[in-house]
Image (cartoon, helix red, strand yellow):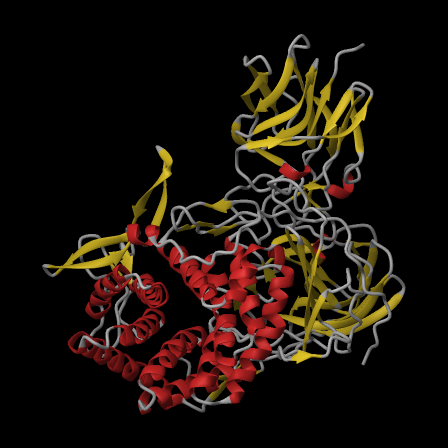
């Protein structure tokens, strides 16, 4: 057992900006969900469905239009059932009678989509035909049937006074329970081996995620009908399987997560990951502490980690951050709310509120995904973009999370925090390292982090650079197993860290192997993988701080979350101010004395402060912004664009998949390699004009032009100088100069494609002979940052710039030049 020796690092400069949102104590807005309701005529009878998609109207983006899928249909039981849960919970919590009416209308469609054997169809076409042949719709006891059980169970207490309708609901639920029991009971207690792992064989359709959804519904039903023996038996069988499919340890993958797919014990996804919710509810209903403890173990370790490091789509086993959608966030938040409900412990509700804060801007872009005015929940976040579609699944999921938060004042209070700083895990792509000065041979593999693995033979010595705060770290190797021996040793500087072997006869897959602990006392640190036996298909080094840190802020307060990855106790940092509230929890989330951070535990420190929050409205797509002077050099005023930056154009050798300059529609894009350009925040010059180079070591370092109005320091100027570039072609667009006398002067701004020669008279301010591809590899292609000049009228006082709306154009710096005196 290792004793960590590095000091606990303190927090430095702010790394990310978000938008402060008030705690949402009021009921969520259901207007957009109501608007998604659509009539359907099936066999001559009118039913109510829910349009699966909604997107901005091209003619007026403020308005939305419903949309179907021509191959699947217009409405789906998957969404209708979850909307029933929203409406029933809203009726129970907010006493809106109209919500119960809408739930009843949707339940009629739920009943119509059930077959005589208890199974369900999923999709209905706009003309009322039930899709009985599609892979995502045919009759089955699977995902949509499990959600139907949940909807029926939630609705039964609400309609108990209507015995006829309640009887129809309970009859449908009983038939569905029978359909699932016919799958589960014959195989209960049987196991099979996949890739050397022993996996329960009795999940419905081999889906632990399906089992979890069904278990949530059964727990709700047993709260209403506690003596139903068939439901109790099925619930216990499902939860026994969920507990058994929680492999790993706190220090080895999947780090106590409950895995979703019984055919794939090497991956996890956030979408529909309701195992914590299911086990927390069932632990109370069935009085089984083992279920509750299993839920606690996953929540206190990996769910807290996902708060500290940021939401991800999943692990394959390498982290896949994007796309992030409300369906993933809500599933995890609902697990925490269920733990709060079952245990009475408020910390779970607080953590659930922090997850739900993702809807209000507590995310990597600092952008809200819930619009309280319209009730829309947007469809998700990519690496640099917000998907402004607002379909049924996202809307329903966001509203479920908000209704969960509404039950707990401590969760409502947690919705208003803003991201200030994060120190968490990093993924270093091995294929971007160097072997005696040259990059390694690489191979494309779909499940690899970044889509590639490095092919390393015996004798290879691959070096990577880790840029991180001083402190203790743990390293894991992600690599593909092979029948041949593959043995690798990790060195941190000159220190030997540890060794791993990747030999695995039979089924080949990616695995995560611990390599050991090391201390970083100054950055950057060179990590070296030395291969003793090969060949080895190395994917990435996954590096964790011994203690992750997430700093949140709001006016007058700060909140610091600490998450331990250490097997030994860690010192807590000194209290920032007298009176700091310090709460410490062990690896199962049980309160501890606030003297040290327990192994794999977490802590929350909260204190009052008079320090202002960082200014700026980062992430805004348009609007008015006051821009201040950063520094003045003679006649040149270098403006501070940091609060306005809304994207990341740069990557580094240690974070080759960070950033996305040229692909607004996907999670990955090509980037400038920051290590080959000027230092972050330095002063660069082009034709003697100084510019403040952007902070390439943060996630915000470029401004995408979307029609923003920049209010500059009023004054008389002879020229506006800028650093910028275009992507996906070269563009010339109109900038409007607004003078104090009220006149507006339109001028043209031309910026050339970043990897082409200048076409509009620009100067090449900086260039690099390489760019980094969307898979993290260096490509031999010269790319540039241009300096462009716009003449101004020195006889008039400039007050603002109105930028063009062209998101292919990006700015890195602005400098105003005063007239010569």
Quadrant of residue 124 in the image? bottom left
The percent coordinates of residue 343 (x first, y second) are 52, 80
Residue 441 place in picture, x, y as percent: 70, 55
Specify the quadrant of the image occupied by residue 319.
bottom right
Image quadrant in which you'd find residue 144: bottom left
657 lies above or below 184: above
Which percent across, then down, holds residue 105? 21, 63
- Residue at image position (62%, 50%) is 775
Residue 795 in view, yes or no: yes
The quarter of the picture where the C terminus appears is top right
Instruction: Pick out the residue farthest to the right.
Output: 494
**Toward the viewer: 309 or 776?**
309
Residue 198 visible from this viewpoint: no
> Picture coordinates of residue 193 (x, y %)?
52, 84
Which residue lies most toward the left here? 44
**Left or right: where 576 falls relative to 301:** right
Q: Residue at x 39, y 81 (%)?
A: 219
Residue reaching furthest to the top: 795
Q: Is residue 333 above or below residue 501?
A: above
Along the line of sight, the residue nearer the viewer: 129 or 275 = 275
Q: Which part of the image, by quadrant, shows the N terminus?
A: bottom right
Closest to the observer, 444 or 66: 66
Picture layout, residue 671 above or below residue 796: below
Q: How many marks?
A: 0
Left or right: residue 13 versus residue 623 is: right
């Amino acid at each position: 057992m290792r004793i960590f020796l590095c000091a606990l690092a303190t927090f430095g400069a702010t790394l990310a900006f978000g938008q402060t949102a008030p705690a949402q104590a009021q009921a969520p807005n259901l207007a957009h969900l109501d608007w998604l309701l659509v009539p359907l005529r099936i066999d001559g009878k009118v039913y109510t469905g829910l349009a699966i998609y909604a997107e901005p109207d091209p003619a007026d983006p403020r308005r939305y239009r419903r949309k179907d899928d021509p191959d699947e249909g217009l409405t789906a039981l998957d969404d209708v059932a979850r909307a029933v849960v929203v409406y029933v919970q809203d009726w129970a919590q907010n006493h809106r009678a109209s919500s119960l009416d809408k739930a009843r209308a949707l339940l009629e469609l739920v009943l119509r989509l059930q077959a005589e054997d208890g199974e369900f169809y999923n999709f209905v076409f706009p003309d009322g035909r039930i899709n009985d042949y599609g892979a995502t719709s045919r009759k089955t006891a699977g995902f949509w049937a499990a959600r139907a059980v949940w909807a029926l169970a939630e609705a039964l207490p609400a309609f108990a006074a209507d015995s006829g309708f309640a009887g129809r609901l309970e009859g449908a639920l009983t038939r569905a329970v029978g359909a699932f029991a016919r799958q589960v009971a014959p195989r209960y207690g049987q196991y099979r081996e996949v890739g050397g792992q022993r996996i329960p064989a009795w999940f419905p359709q081999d889906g632990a995620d399906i089992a979890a959804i069904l278990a949530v519904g059964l727990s709700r039903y047993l709260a209403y009908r506690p003596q139903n023996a068939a439901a109790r038996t099925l619930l216990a069988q499902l939860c026994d399987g969920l507990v058994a499919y929680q492999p790993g340890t706190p220090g080895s993958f999947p780090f106590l997560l409950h895995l979703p797919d019984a055919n794939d014990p090497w991956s996890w996804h956030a979408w529909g990951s309701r195992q914590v919710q299911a086990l927390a509810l069932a632990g109370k209903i069935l009085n089984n502490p083992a279920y509750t403890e299993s839920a606690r173990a996953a929540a206190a370790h990996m769910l807290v980690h996902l708060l500290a490091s940021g939401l991800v789509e999943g692990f394959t086993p390498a982290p896949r951050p994007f796309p992030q959608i409300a369906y993933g966030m809500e599933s995890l938040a609902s697990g925490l709310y269920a733990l709060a409900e079952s245990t009475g412990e408020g910390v779970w509700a607080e953590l659930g509120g922090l997850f739900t804060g993702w809807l209000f801007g507590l995310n990597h872009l600092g952008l809200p995904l819930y619009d309280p005015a319209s009730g829309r929940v947007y469809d998700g976040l990519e690496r640099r973009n917000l998907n402004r579609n607002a379909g049924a699944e996202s809307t329903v999921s966001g509203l479920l999370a908000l209704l969960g938060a509404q039950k707990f004042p401590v969760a409502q209070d947690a919705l208003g925090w803003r991201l200030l700083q994060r120190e968490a895990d990093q993924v270093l792509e091995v294929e971007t390292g160097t072997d005696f000065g040259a990059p390694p041979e690489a191979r494309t593999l779909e499940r690899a982090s970044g889509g590639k693995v490095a092919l390393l033979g015996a004798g290879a010595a691959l070096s990577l650079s880790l840029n991180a705060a001083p402190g203790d770290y743990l390293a894991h190797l992600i690599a593909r197993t092979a029948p041949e021996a593959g043995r690798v040793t990790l060195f941190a500087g000159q220190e030997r860290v540890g060794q791993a072997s990747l030999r695995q006869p039979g089924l080949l897959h990616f695995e995560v192997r611990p390599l050991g602990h090391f201390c970083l006392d100054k950055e950057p640190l060179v990590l070296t993988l030395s291969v003793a036996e090969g060949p080895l298909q190395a994917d990435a080094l996954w590096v964790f701080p011994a203690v992750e840190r997430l700093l949140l802020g709001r006016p007058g307060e700060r909140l610091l979350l600490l998450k331990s990855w250490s097997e030994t106790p860690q010192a807590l940092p000194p209290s920032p101010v007298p009176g700091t509230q310090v709460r410490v929890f062990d690896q199962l989330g049980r309160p501890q004395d606030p003297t040290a951070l327990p192994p794999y535990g977490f802590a929350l420190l909260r204190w009052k402060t008079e320090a202002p929050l960082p200014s700026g409205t980062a992430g805004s797509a348009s609007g008015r912004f006051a821009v201040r002077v950063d520094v003045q050099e003679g006649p040149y005023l270098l403006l501070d664009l940091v609060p306005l930056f809304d994207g990341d154009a740069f990557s580094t050798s240690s974070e080759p998949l960070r950033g996305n300059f040229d692909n607004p529609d996907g999670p990955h894009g090509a980037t400038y390699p920051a290590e080959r350009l000027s230092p972050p925040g330095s002063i660069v010059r082009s034709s003697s004009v100084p510019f403040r180079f952007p902070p390439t070591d943060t996630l915000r370092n470029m401004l995408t032009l979307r029609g923003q109005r920049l209010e500059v320091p009023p004054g008389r100027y002879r020229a506006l100088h800028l650093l910028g570039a275009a992507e996906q072609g070269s563009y010339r667009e109109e900038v409007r100069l607004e003078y104090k006398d009220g006149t507006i002067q339109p001028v043209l701004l031309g910026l050339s494609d970043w990897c082409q020669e200048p076409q509009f008279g620009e100067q090449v301010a900086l260039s690099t002979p390489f760019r980094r591809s969307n898979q993290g590899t260096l490509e031999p292609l010269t790319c540039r940052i241009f300096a462009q000049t716009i003449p101004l009228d020195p006889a008039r006082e400039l007050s603002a710039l109105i930028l063009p709306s062209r998101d292919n154009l990006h700015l890195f710096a602005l400098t105003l030049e005063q007239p010569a005196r």
